Structure formats: C-alpha cells, structure tokens
Amino acid sequence: MPEGHTIHRLAADHLRMFGGRRVHVGSPQGRFVEGARLLDGLVLREADAHGKHLLLGFGEDRILHVHLGIYGKYTFGVGRAPDPVGAVRLRLESEGAGPGAWADLRGPNACEVLDPGEVKVLRDRLGADPLRADTDPDVAWRRISRSRASVAVLLMDQSVVAGPGNIYRAEVLFRQGVHPQVLGRDLGWERWSRIWADLRVLMADGVRSGRIDTVRAEHMPEAMGRPPRVDDHGGEVYVYRRAGLPCLVCGCEVRAEVVAGRNLFWCPGCQPAVG
C-alpha cells in the first residue's frame, strides 16, 4: 500500500495539472458513474492529503475522496487522453484553453464524493500526519503514552499516526535505536519526539524524491563500497526486507517477524531489547 508521501505527491500532481481548471469527470468502468456526474464540469479548487487519504475539492462543497488501498494506482498524461484500457474507475480530463491533461485511477479502495461534514468525520478519525503543517504530535503522544500496544503496532495505526506504513515504521525505529516491541507507555516523550521529528524529515524527503530513502550518507552504497539495493520499492534502507542480511551499521543479522499481519524488520544489535 502506498505510504503517506505518495498521497501528498498525488495532491501536488493534481493541483499542477488540473488546479483552477474545469474538469470533465467520467467513469469508464462504470462503478463511479453517479459520483462522476456530481463532479463533471466543476473546477478543481484544492487538493489535499491526510495520511493515506487524497481529498480533491471541487465547487459546490463537493470533495472527491480517494484511498488507494493495496491495488489503487494513478496514471497521468498530457495531451489528448487515450482510449481507456482496463478497469478505469475514474478519469479526469481538463477542459478549456491550453495543453490538455488527464488522469486515470484504477483499483482504489475508496473513490467517493463527500460533503464537508463527511470530510470532517474522516479527518477526526485520522491521527497526526507528519507531513501536515497543521498537525499536532501531542495528540498522538497522548494516545501512545497510555497504550499497552507496542510502538511498532502504534506506528501502523492510522488513527494514531496517519501516513507511515511498513517501510517508514521499520526504518524510523531503526534510525532511533528503538526496539519495535517497546510498549507505548514505556516509550517516553524524548524517544517519541525523536521518532516524530525523524518521520517528518524522512517523509518530506519522500515527497520530493518520490521514493523512500532512509540511509545516512555514510552508509550509502558509494560510501561503503557495496552494490545498491535492488527492490521494487526502490530506495536505500537499513532493515526493511533485509532479513538474514548483515546490518549496515553493526553487522548483526537483521531479523523479521509477523506483527499485526505485517512483516516487521529490525536489528538486534542497533535496537536492543530493554528489560
């Protein structure tokens, strides 16, 4: 599933290609016909992201909510839109003068039109987003500091912290030397503040580059004389999907286990268990 930096990039892409322009909205697949009819011919006025949720604001208080889920994917293009191929749930096409632009959405978990009240309900159930300037990390901390769940579970709970997924979860805990099984109530404010600050930096880098890189300069391939990572997720990482390989920092074997249905990666040397 795409992590939060990808959704913030999608919001910026929509503004760049369609912002301030009247948009033709269709559903070639036929599963979003009624929603498309509500938006067709309106102007895209704003594009926002909260965690893994994309919110596109049109006139008349109509907001398109998209959650990609595991299989959702956007395709963007400039010029005349091609004939739809496959199950295109949503197609946007710019209208008016200037070069045309189009976007196709396939396989989302959610694609629906909401009103402002419904958007508020959605936002209220989401946690603090490290990429939003208006977010309050203290709200997340109040929940974490009282929780008997592990920090690894809490960082994947979108009602606590919105946006990070499995990669950012594993990597930020490694970078801060925190064992993933530390309980929220035992984490402490100082460690939480370091995790939060690091997430903000790492995820902002992801928005700029479009990939997840978490390795510091001294551990990059060219600095260590090692081959670059080859993985469909791209980017250089410390522990994610490196189970059984030596840690880039201490040489210990990276470990993995399934926690809450997801693979969890960590280094026992750099992230020692406490107590």
Image: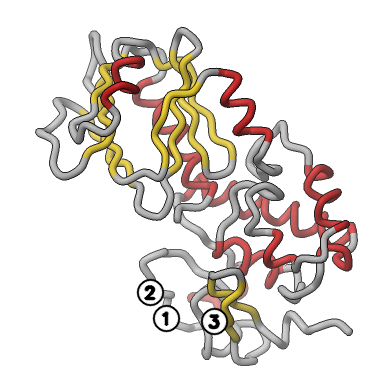
Query: Cα distance, mark 1 to mark 3?
Result: 9 Å
**In front: mark 1 or mark 2?**
2
Do the numbered discs 1 and 2 sit on residues whose CB atoms are within 8 Å?
yes
Do the numbered discs 3 and 2 sit on residues whose CB atoms are within 8 Å?
no
Q: Residue furthest left?
A: 83
The amino acid marked with disc number 1 is Pro
Mark 2: which secondary structure? loop
**In front: mark 3 or mark 2?**
2
Q: Which residue is mark 3?
A: 224
Residue 97 got which mark? none
Query: Cα distance, mark 1 to mark 2?
Result: 9 Å
Residue 232 lies, with reference to residue 194, above or below; the image says below
Q: Quadrant of residue 104?
A: top left
Q: Position of residue 121 (x, y in %)?
A: 63, 29
Q: Earlier in the sequence, mark 3 or mark 2?
A: 3
The amino acid marked with disc number 2 is Val
Q: Position of residue 187 (x, y in %)?
A: 85, 65
Q: Residue at x 49, y 29 (%)?
A: 55
Q: How would you rate the neighbour count of disc 3 (Cα within 10 Å): few for under 14, some for 14-19, many for 20 or more? A: few
Residue 227 got which mark? 1
Horizontal relation, residue 82 to residue 165: left or right: left
Q: How would you rate the neighbour count of disc 2 (Cα within 10 Å): few for under 14, some for 14-19, many for 20 or more? A: few
Q: Residue at x 35, y 15 (%)?
A: 38
Q: Position of residue 249 (x, y in %)?
A: 65, 83
Q: Which residue is mark 2?
A: 230
The amino acid marked with disc number 3 is Met
